[in-house]
Image: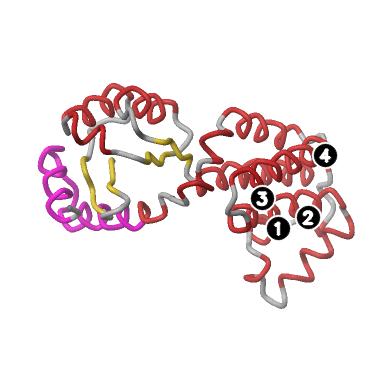
Amino acid sequence: MLIDLKRACVIELLPERTQAAVIASLQQQGPAFCQAIEVFSCDMWDGFVNSATAVLPNATIVIDRFHVMRQLHEAIDKARRALRHMQPDQDVLKRLRWLFLKHPEELTPDEQPRLEQAFQAFPEVEQLWQLKEDFRRWYDTFDCPDQADWWLSQWIDQAKALGNRYLDTFVKTLQRWRTSILNFFVHRITNGLVEGINNIIKAINRRAFGFVNFDHFRLRVLLECR
């Protein structure tokens, strides 16, 4: 699904998620369209990035912050689960997944003490949680790309010092996509509205009890989301 984030509408719905399909769809919009695109926001899939590089000569690529945070959450949760498996008899580590990923301000009075008990028993759990929270706040703290870049280097050093293989994998992802991730601090654009459009498309599909013909489905989505 290709979306105009400025106008909050669907540009095109593709039958498959391949680089060739994305490139062909963008090219069908015409040279003027491709040259006019200034920012291309996407997840960390090579197909999207390569497509933008190939046919959008004036576009700055921004890796969507929510996809970066999702990968960090997955790494943090894998680290938590690994510790849980190493300490199967520790009750303070049980049923922590959603508490661990919640924002601090969203914790209930009953949930906060449970999290603090886990922190006291296992300092590594607190370190993982703090790294997650620091990274989340990073996106909202800095307006200057250079300052954001400097802070990211400090965060990466802290994450490496923990010696956790799941965090190390996430750090490698950060380093690979670093320039495009930092472009967020230039353009401040995200794919946040995509989830809302996804919900509309799911509702379209439910109302029709599913579509046998993809072309019919595509036309209905473009009619209602354009």
Earlier in the chain: of badge 2 and badge 4, it is 2
Q: CA distance from mark 2 to mark 3?
A: 23 Å
The disc placed on residue 96 is 1
- The CA span between labels 1 and 2 is 6 Å
Q: Few, some or many C-alpha atoms within 10 Å of disc 3 (few <14, some 14-19, many ≥20)?
A: some
Query: Which image quadrant for residue 217?
Result: top left
Whether tag 4 and tag 3 are in contact, CB under 8 A, the answer is no
Tell which tag, 1 or 3, sits nearer the viewer: 3
Identified by mark 2, the residue type is Leu
Q: Kindly identify the amino acid type of the residue bearing the numbered disc 4.
A: Leu
Q: Nearer the viewer, residue 206 or 181?
A: 181
Which structural element holds mark 1? loop
**What is the span of residues highlighted in magenta in the rendered image?**
196-224
- The quadrant of the picture occupied by the N terminus is top left
Residue at 10% over, 43% down:
216
Q: Is residue 76 left or right of residue 57?
A: right
- Pinpoint residue 156: horizontal percent, then vertical percent: 73, 38
Q: Which mark is residue 93?
A: 2
Q: Which mark is residue 75?
A: none
Kind of residue sitting beneath label 3: Phe
What residue is at 29 percent from the left and 25 percent from the top?
55
Disc 2 or 3, which lies upstream in sequence? 2
Q: Is most of the magenta stretch helix, strand or loop? A: helix
Asked whether disc 1 touches disc 2, contact meaning CB atoms under 8 Å apart, the reply is yes
Q: Which mark is residue 162?
A: 4
Helix, strand or loop status at disc 3: helix
| Residue 212 vs residue 176, the one in the foreground | 176
Secondary structure found at label 4 = loop
